[in-house]
Amino acid sequence: MSTNGTRIKGPVQFDKVVWGIFLVFLVFVLARYMQWGARREILATIRIEFLTGGLVIIASLVQMSSLRAMQEGSRRVYMMIGALLLIIAVQVPFAANRPIASIVFQDRVIKFAMLAFLIAVQVRSPKAMRLFVAAFLLSMLYITQESVQGLISGGLVWQNQGIMRLHGAVPMYAHPNSLGGVSASVVPFCVFLLPVVKRLWQRGALLALLSTSIICVVYSGSRTAYVGCLAFVLGWFLVSRNKKRWVAIGLVVGTAAMLALPDDYKDRFLSIGGEEAEGHSKEARLQILDDAWQIFTQNPGGVGVSSFTAVRQQMFGRIQDTHNLYLEVATNLGIQGLAVFLGFVWVVSRRLVQVRNDLARRRDRLQALVKKKAGGSRYRKALEGEASDLDFLLACAQATTFFIIVRMVVGLFGMDLYEIYWWFAAGMAIALTEIADVAIRRAKVLEERITGSEPDDSVLGGV
């Protein structure tokens, strides 16, 4: 292994990224999350998502043969992806509403699951991860700032359940709960990436996204999103190293926020455990939960994909869906499906936590060398560069873990089984596992070079 004064080179390298295909992949990500097809007729006509996604899928299948051997942790995630897809597929032909089940399986389950595969194959280096996360967060910034503009102009705000609620500008985010939920989900990325980005404009962009996301959460009036954000804040406190400082800052920020918050939204938050200003949302939800439990106990094997509403109408004459992720899984996929889904979430979450811990240990060792100015000027930039990569990957693992936590809490009040969130998290878990393995080995080799405990070439593969 040699240095050029900037970064280390040698056989311990990340998988090659085919940048032409990767750029098409980024276009697909932007088109998917910004909903280009819903904004421009010509993009809908050419089916921009299908066109770019199909091209990247074909290229990814070809690229798979040139990738390094898969890590054991990635295999476990792939196995759970396969198990979840299988358990959903089995419920399609036996669904109470087979036409709807087929449409949902093809248009949502299969298409969204492809995102996990594309992330796993295309995002194979720290640079690729940076660009992918940037594309994802840029999409979220566009969506949230669009709603903030609609809040200012009044074009995306109208009364619902006694308060003025903010909506999204495109169908996927149109409902206040959808806008609030997706906004709450990106807060962990803003929080954990902010300390590790170096450039001023990057920090400015993250702060802008954090601001627009919080505004969307508050003015959406979504109690689901409120609870999701509270879960994140609690989790963030628990993992904080300096809890006293965290509490002090949190009290100041929280007090200022409560003073600035309009009374309608304070009351909306307090209505989680009290009376609503208007409507009977809570009573309706309690009725849904009771109906869902009865349907589940009478059909423990599941009523089929997206078939709860059809069965509920037949049994009770009511048509609203479960408004609860766990009862959605249980009623649609049965007890076996609930077990597989929870196993899927557990494996993905555990993988992310393990990646985070492995990266943190190696990062701390490199940072200690940086502080000691070990290796002199020859290795300074190499040390800083590798430590920066580890820092960024660690932040992504932490953010994705909390992304899952937010979605699981939001799932107490919403139906997300057939949404893209789970596949995004699974793809991130695989990509981070593979990138972290190489990043940690590179950091280890660099440390051994600097400290004089360099292994022989047979161990390093001829470095």
Image (cartoon, rainbow, N blue to C red):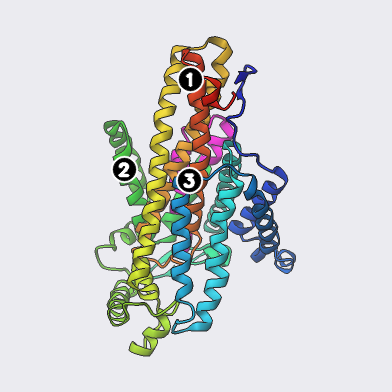
Please state which of the two labelled residues, at mark 3 or mark 1, is closer to the viewer. Answer: 1
Q: Residue at x 56, y 67 (%)?
A: 171
The residue under label 2 is 255
Residue 447: which disc? 1
Q: Is residue 174 left or right of residue 287?
A: right
The residue under label 3 is 211
In this view, 333 is above or below 37: below
Please state which of the two labelled residues, at mark 1 or mark 2, is closer to the viewer. Answer: 1
SS class of the residue under badge 1? helix
Q: Is residue 397 left or right of residue 121?
A: left
In this view, 48 is above or below 426: below
Between 369 and 255, the one lying in front of the other is 369
**Label 2 crowd bin: few (<14), some (14–19), many (20+), radius 10 Å:** few
Q: Residue at x 53, y 34 (%)?
A: 438
344 part of magenta stretch: no
- In terms of image quadrants, where is residue 33? bottom right
Q: Which segment did they paint magenta?
A: 177-206
Q: Residue at x 48, y 25 (%)?
A: 444
Between 66 and 268, the one lying in front of the other is 66
Name the spot of residue 403 as percent of width and height, x first. Answer: 42, 50
The type of residue carrying mark 1 is: Glu
Q: Where's the N terminus, which quadrant? A: top right
User: Which one is earlier in the sequence, the residue at label 3 or at label 2?
Assistant: 3
SS class of the residue under badge 3? helix
In this view, 282 is above or below 377: below
The type of residue carrying mark 3 is: Ser
202 part of magenta stretch: yes
User: Which one is earlier in the sequence, the residue at label 3 or at label 1?
Assistant: 3
**Label 3 crowd bin: few (<14), some (14–19), many (20+), radius 10 Å:** some
